[in-house]
Image (cartoon, grey):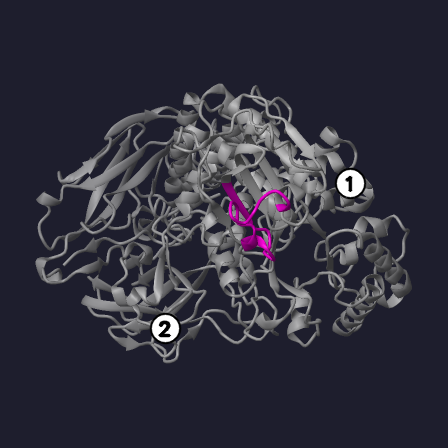
Amino acid sequence: MLDPAIVSFEPVPAGLSLAGLPVFVDRQDFRGVQIAAQNLVKDLKRASGQNSDLIVRDSAPDANAPLEAAILVGSIQNSHLLRDHITSEIFDTQSLEGKWESFTTAVITLPWARKCLVIAGSDKRGTIFGIYTLSEQLGISPWHWWADVPVKVQQHLYALPVTVHQGEPSVRYRGIFINDEAPSLTSWVHEKFGKKYNAEFYKTVFELLLRLKANFLWPAMWSGHPFPGSSFFTDDPRNQELADEYGIVVSTSHHEPMQRSTTEWLVKGNRRWAWDTSKEEIKTFFQEGAQRAKPYESYLTLGMRGAGDRKIEAENPRATLADVIQCQRDIIDSAYGSPDGERQLMALYKEVLEYYEAGLSIPDDVTLMFPDDNFGNLRRLPTKAERQRAGGAGVYYHLEYVGRPRGYKWINTNSCAKIYHQLRTAYDGGADTVWVINVGDIKPLELPISFVMGLAWNIRSFSASTIPIFFHEYSRWQFGDYAEPIAKLLLRHDRLLAIRKHEHLESDTLSIINYREADTILGRWNLLENDAVAVFEHLQDGYKGAFFQLVLHPIKASRVYTELRIAQAKNQLYGSQRRSSTNSWAQRTLRLFEEDFSLSQQYHNNPWTGDKWNHIMRQPHYGYSATEWQDPSRDLITGLCYVQTRQDSNPLAGNMGVAVEGHPGVRPGLINEETDRMQPSRNDLLAGLTLPPLSPHGPASRYFEIYSRSSSQFRWTVTASTNWVRLSQTFGEMGPDTEIDPRVEMSIDWTAVPVGYDEVIQIDIRSSLGDYEQVHLPVVNPAAALLPRVSHGFVECDGYVSIEPGSVPLSPQQKLHYEHHPFLGRLESGSIAVRRVTAPDNASPPPLTYDVYLLTATAVPTIRLYFTMALETDPHTPLLYSIIVDNRSWKEGGTRLLSGADSPGQLPRGWSQATMDGVWKRRHELPSLSVGAHSIGIMLHTTGLVLEKVVLDLGGVRASYLGPPASVFVPT
């Protein structure tokens, strides 16, 4: 993606015009090189508008009649055209000897061509990657077929007169796992390619992978509809051979040992997939797989799990698994001539990691595949001793998943910053032999797949602070001249995705009454969608199909999903309050439900791509169970409320209701004859009509809403008891058909408020039907004595101090230990992480120190910490942090972030909630704090810890998903 430039769209001195040039390849070269050369010819035609010819030869052209210009591609292993006709004086191929997947390009003079662009590879894939690097720089996106990306015909197309050496990739084997592919991908494949995952389908996958500089595949294997499911090896006998020809290393997933698919076992009959009862049959099954794979470049998967990807069925699972591995090694010895005769991996997935931690022995030459937790959080990385293993270590990482606590496979909900943090940690931790990424249906995950493969090719392509460069390069791939505005849309989309995965969002996730949380997040989605629509309307028609798939649809679908959940929440709250508008919010929810489905249908058949992608957005995503992990079979929404709008409320309640920010109401929708008979409300009802306070150091306004609970129309008026309270509206009319209840915003003219003022303002609301209610607004304008000029820091308001560490610049000393990740985590300000390479081991990490100023004394304050979701990847190094209050450590030696696992390899206590929230939340009681200035310090001891938010709760924190918004900071 960020490879050195070899192409220019402007004429350059000594450059080589590429339009119409013939492409030469040796007949004896690898078949994969020849396939890539064929595609290069097509790419040259797309980019230049002129035909190029592919010339396959056994020898060089006649030197007595040299060509004016040509392109020569080949591997130094098999191309005689390279080896026999290019000398080291004019083109250095020695630097490629013995290298892995490397290439060199240069414009040189040959006896048979006055100018020749040479692409020489160290091996088959090195050559292929060199060819596709040229194609990419011609303007051909790796996703050109998958994303329906148009190619801009260039007037000028020149090879630069420079020599480019591309060294070995960062990760040796890197690729995808096509998993959980029904109903979407399977239905699409059956419609477009036939009733099997055949070679014609896999050609598109192989080419895509190679254009992305990937080389590895766990193929589709879903064993469901239609029975018995998919098998790469038997669905089409050409699949395995074709993968090898293209240059793709085929392996099988964590629960498909020895190059055999689950489907193949199912067709054999009803024998149990259990080693203790079917050992001989399974052994023969493994032998057949090893023999079948022998002619091809493969990576054999060892081990065994139970049927249906569950735990292995055995009385002693670890001993049984050890026996399985020994048997598999014997089979490999027999088939290949030695137990390490072919590459092998062992996926330490779920309970297998526990067996490994408990002593399961795995041969040294076998690659250890460490998994994430299925939600993008690495569970384990190799120890110092494990890094010395001959087989190395790898990572099995999920961009989609079906399983506990709740799956996600509809559209992309992966944040690139989170992917970067975890995979860069994996690479730095020595897991760089194999990266296999679970990508489900492929199509919805084009962007994160590109990001991961870019990192695997060159881990230094991006850093924590340069992730926007990826979005620009990705947009340039797909949209050329439109890249800049589209990249900004994608970055904003990525930041919103980090808040929570869509499938994990329910109506009660975001607060609709506290901190304007739900409305703020929905507002960001709406603004993003509006901006995306504006870009879409200005695109040339040829780009609209790709833009809809890659940008507009995921943004629209995300907005609809979020808005629907918020509409459900408001419908339920308003129903409890018996608002007449309850029904309009039920109808809005249903309209959004229909909009969601219509949007997927538009994806399946539209004016830009027709029905090419029918079924791809078919995955149900509403209707998960609260107690079970399985995917819904069909979309479902529940819990809608309706009120009888032709019926009046009990006279004690009245015709007009008032709801305030921050409170659902006391006994909403219910009445008590002893306390509801007065107007306005008093006594125990006051809490439900009292707003959070307004102060100069808090939100600019507070609000209340007026609603109808009557069958009649009425007028309403609002007045304040003082003239420096500003009201956004003071009168209106409403009735049983009002769909959006009026919201009255209250702000303060602080220039008119006396210094030291601390009173409750009364806001009167009256209706033409005789209703009278009062809202109570606390107003606090601290006395000058409480805020001396010399003080500074985050100022208390509304009973809390909320700090976003990502918004506070790091000092030079702190930068030795920490780094700002501006795009990581749920907050727009990013997070603070422990640096990968920190100060010397004997240096104590400095605290992240924040000055705060308290306006109230608190006997038992608490501190709430939000850490970006992470797990302990080193079994010997716990994640530790310390809290320091006014330069005094609150707990010597630090506090361990995670706890509760019964044995090594298990997930910690609270993981199910934290992995859906995206953060670990920790709460600690602190010693009493007086009014005035204080210092709060958080010390992060361990690599892997990422701090997102610090909240000092002085008794006022209300329930919300993201926690209270950032407090006002007063500079010195």
Compared with residue 885, is residue 548 higher up or lower down, i.e. above or below?
A: above
Three-letter code, disc 2: Ser
896 sits to left or right of 359 = left
- Ranked by sequence position, the earlier of labels 1 and 2 is 1
Q: Is residue 255 magenta?
A: no
Identify the disc placed on residue 15. none
The answer to whether residue 184 is seen in the rendering is: no
Compared with residue 150, is residue 316 higher up or lower down, i.e. above or below?
A: below
Q: CA distance from mark 1 to mark 2?
A: 52 Å
Compared with residue 713, is residue 141 higher up or lower down, i.e. above or below?
A: below
**Tag 1, which secondary structure?**
loop
Q: Is residue 104 magenta?
A: yes
**Tag 2, which secondary structure?**
strand
Indicate the position of residue 949 as horizontal and vertical percent values.
36, 58
Which is nearer the eye, 300 or 179?
A: 300
Q: Main secondary structure of the magenta part?
A: loop
Indicate the position of residue 669 as horizontal and vertical percent values.
44, 42
Answer few, some or many: residues within 10 Å of disc 1's Cα (few below 14, many 20 plus, some between 14 and 19). Answer: few
Three-letter code, disc 1: His
Which is nearer the eye, 223 or 167?
A: 167
The answer to whether residue 647 is seen in the rendering is: yes
User: Label 2, on which residue?
Assistant: 882
Which is nearer the eye, 217 or 180?
A: 217
527 sits to left or right of 302 = left
User: Label 1, on which residue?
Assistant: 225
Indicate the position of residue 964 as horizontal and vertical percent values.
34, 53
- The magenta region covers 83-106
Give the image quarter of residue 258. Answer: bottom right
Task: Look at 49% across and 61% down and name the residue there.
Answer: 425
